[in-house]
Amino acid sequence: MQSLANFGDGGPGPWILLFPVIWVLVIGGGVALLRRTVWRGRRGPGAWSGARTVADDSPIAVLGHRFATGDIDEDEYWRRLSVLDERFGRTGRDGAR
């Protein structure tokens, strides 16, 4: 009689490949769950991502929304962002201050 642990001539058979796939799915699901719940609220200087956040009603955020919706083109976006960078002191296009 064949079983999952004893396939054909005594080897483990193709079922041995199922266990690493299960572990990858379990670990990936855990990371996805943590990203959607626990890690979502962490932003700012102490955050793991290190990304700076901008308030939704700030001029930079409004400019970004206008660019994302297609109201302005890329050249106009960078031109206006450079003016806002001078005013609000954020980093520029190449990441330099």
Image (cartoon, rainbow, N blue to C red):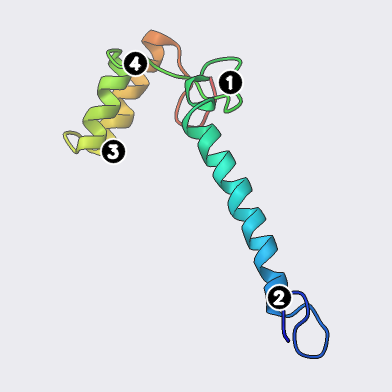
Q: Residue furthest top?
A: 87
Cβ–Cβ under 8 Å for marks 4 and 3: no
Relative vertical location of residue 9 with respect to residue 82 in this rendering, above or below? below
- The mark nearer the N terminus, 4 or 2, is 2
Crowd around label 3: few <14 · some 14–19 · many ≥20 (10 Å): few
Separation of residues labelled 4 and 3 (CA atoms): 15 Å
Say what secondary structure mark 4 lies in.
Answer: helix
Q: Nearer the viewer, mark 2 or mark 3?
A: 2
Q: Residue furthest left?
A: 71
Say what secondary structure mark 3 lies in.
Answer: helix
Q: Is residue 79 left or right of residue 15?
A: left
Q: Position of residue 21 (x, y in %)?
A: 63, 62
Separation of residues labelled 1 and 3 (CA atoms): 29 Å
Q: Which residue is mark 1?
A: 47
- The mark nearer the N terminus, 1 or 4, is 1
- The mark nearer the N terminus, 4 or 3, is 3
**Residue type, numbered disc 2:** Leu
Q: Which residue is mark 4?
A: 84
Q: Which residue is mark 3?
A: 74
Q: Nearer the viewer, mark 1 or mark 4?
A: 1
**Residue type, numbered disc 4:** Leu
Query: For this rendering, which residue is in front, 7 or 67?
Result: 7
Q: Residue at x 71, y 75 (%)?
A: 4
Query: For this rendering, which residue is in front, 77 or 38?
Result: 38
Cβ–Cβ under 8 Å for marks 1 and 4: no
**Residue type, numbered disc 3:** Glu
- The mark nearer the N terminus, 1 or 3, is 1
Q: Residue at x 40, y 13 (%)?
A: 86
Crowd around label 4: few <14 · some 14–19 · many ≥20 (10 Å): some
